[in-house]
Image (spheres, rainbow, N blue to C red):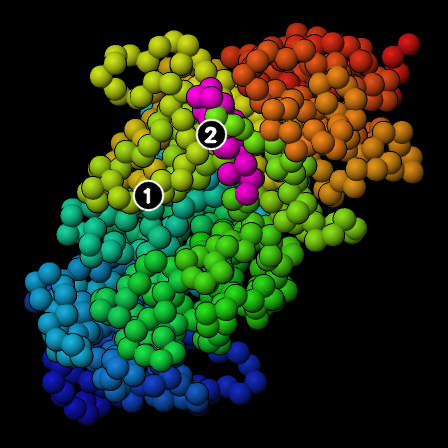
Amino acid sequence: MTDIEIDVLSGPRYSAEQPEPAGLPTQAPVRLGAHLVSGGADFLLLAPHASEVTLCLFFDDDDGLSEHRYSMNAAKVGYWSARIPGVEAGQRYGYRVAGRWAPELGLSHNPAKLLLDPYARAITQTPVLGPALYGHVVDEDLNPVTIPLEQDNRDSAESMALGVVVEESADATDHPHTAWEDTVIYETHLKGFTKMLPEVPAELRGTYAGMGHEATISQLKSLGITAVELLPIHASMPEPFLEKKGLTNYWGYNTLSFFAPEPSYATEEAQASGPAAVVDEVRQMVANLHAAGLEVILDVVYNHTCEGGADGPMVSLRGLDQSSYYLLEQDDPSQFFDTTGCGNSLDFRRQKVVRLTLDSLRYWVQKIGVDGFRFDLSVTLGRNGKHFDSHHPFFVALTTDPVLGSVKLINEPWDLGPNGWQTGRFMTPTADWNDHFRDTVRAFWVAQPRSLIGGGGGGDLRDLATRLSGSADLFGHGRIPGGRSPAASINFVTAHDGFTMRDLVSYNNKNNQANLESNRDGTNDNKSWDHGHAENSEDGPTPRFVLERRRQTLRNLMGTLILSAGTPMITAGDEFGRTQGGNNNSYCQDNEISWVDWNLEPWQEDLRETVSYLLKIRREHKVLRPTRFYIEGLSPDDQVGDLEWFDCEGNIMSEYRWFDTKHRVVQMLRSGHGTDGDALIVINGSWERSDVRLPNGRETSFEKIWDSSWPTPDCSHPTYIPNAMTALEPLSIQLYISEPGVVWP
């Protein structure tokens, strides 16, 4: 190699050996990123508007970190390539990209800034926030010094995360492939779930290895979970405003790398062994969960990156070519069009953005072994500029991809842009978080009883019935053939963002003071209720009757969630009443506020037993796991409708009663079609005890399987003849299963 020049940036520059075959292949696909080949490594980067790209390799020497630079070869259509002999696994690297500095045109090239390869499969660290990390000159508070932005010439290498070359791993092939109708999702934060779990060894708590530990798996399996949905584990970087407050982005929704796992979640041993060991620990975690029959779904953030708005730091895509990756204002390319609330939005009209996303997803499936993805702010991924397209080319590519089309794909079906709420409008075979289910169930069991006891009004039964039966209004797309199926509705009452289920029934208002935003952050539309006593109030301990009310409401919420048609999602700790002290936006709380507390009181053990029992009943009875929408009519070989509704007298529900806000008792009968018992769900949403006559059904007896007024499951299971009278406590649910094929004499 020949030393050809020294530029204003310190360090020698070398010419790179031309990859073989020369130039960019015109037929075969190219592999972006760094890949080991015989005798060295190939590097390929996409930087369409660059005038020059420099590959920087980093080595340890007596003076610290030394940087060796290589001029990359310009290939076709914006690709830059290099083959460097002697490169081995573990090599640290980054890029410097020269080009036009014209922020007013959306161009911000700055070769003084080291950039992370967006395809790096492992990284050394989280970037260290400071003025050097910005492509433009900033003051000590990281605000721009001038407008228009002035280019900053400080070298950022010492502050940056470096990419790491890793060995190519074998494909992961052992996937559980749980059917959608059998799926029960458990949403959790990887660190927070095991950080305080005493059965996990101390050195593994809060790590990938801790998540894959047998004690963690035992908790999930004994509850009845089939899939773990992990909050983001892509490498991330905290926002500057949080770091100034001494806080961090605990949830991780601020992605630095779409390929590299977050290194801080690895054990100290893996971190000391190097970035490749971090990747291996992630892969082993997935393998351990698979061995127990548990699927792994990743919450992924492809809608924006950690580079923030137009005045944010420069760590990767901004320096490569922000006009090619980010959605810019049409009339002012110096500004980002932000549909995410995070400063920037990736532009999915761009082929390079779609490719980066698909390549990343395939890598996590094929090489790490994950079983699905939940797409944060999925509407942004389907925008053609400002307009959402439910059949966007990205969605078409995603759902028809030979690898990705066979894993679980879940949309968070909204963003903050124009017409941002799109629940139910995404393509098959994807599923959507069903916010209509969340709001309806919260309203019926929490907000409306609060109103009723105060002398106000409640709601009618129509929306609750729709959610119980699978939300066909959103996912049915017509009664026949049935649209996306009930499983496309991811039913949930709580999620990571918002109150825990216990706090939902314990607080009237949020308590987010710990976030240092004067309690302004987090939603005010919680549909919550403290059941008549303010938590942590000066009025003394919470009265026992209030505690009992709250706990029954928890059982009502859990029962509705698990027994409704669709795919249930439980938020970590809700199964035993975890609290965050009323914080409904704990995104910046990497502490006991967010971590799951496993020191349970007896009532919490009882609640967990109830949830586990309900999931067992759901697992044992196909009638509770429908695969098609109901048509509320007779099948040719059945004597009762696939779905029938009855009033408290056991008669078919009259039309007018659906609209009567004072009528809050309903019976829902689902046919088991002779292969399973029929399921009868009886609901009393009123404050009065209600006598109810059970329907005739197919003239078979009904066995009472569960009653939400029971603090723990009652295994006596009393039997009722058709048209028998029963009684429901105020605000309660009962579940009956008939004996298939047994006719009452």
Q: Earlier in the sequence, mark 2 or mark 1?
A: 2
Residue at disc 2, secondary structure: helix
User: What residue is pinned by disc 2?
Assistant: 447
Which residue position holds label 1? 522
Query: Mark 2 and 1 residues: CB-CB less than 8 Å, in contact?
Result: no
Q: CA distance from mark 2 to mark 1?
A: 18 Å
**How many marks are shown on the rendered structure?**
2
Q: Residue at x 48, y 74 (%)?
A: 349
On the rendered image, what quadrant is the N terminus found in?
bottom left
Q: Is residue 529 above or below residue 60?
A: above
User: Mark number for residue 287?
Assistant: none
Residue 290 locus on image (x, y percent): 53, 42
Label 2 is placed on what type of residue? Answer: Ala
Q: Is residue 419 above or below residue 634?
A: below
Q: Which residues are magenta?
A: 436-455
Q: Nearer the viewer, mark 2 or mark 1?
A: 2
| Residue 288 visible in the picture | no
Task: Label 1: state its secondary structure.
Answer: loop
Which residue is at the front of the view, 166 or 56?
Answer: 56
- Under mark 1, the amino acid is Gly
What is the x, y in percent for residue 101?
23, 84
Along the line of sight, the residue nearer the viewer: 253 or 641? 641
Q: Residue at x 44, y 39 (%)?
A: 495
Q: Nearer the viewer, residue 4 or 48?
A: 48
Give the quadrant of residue 660. top right
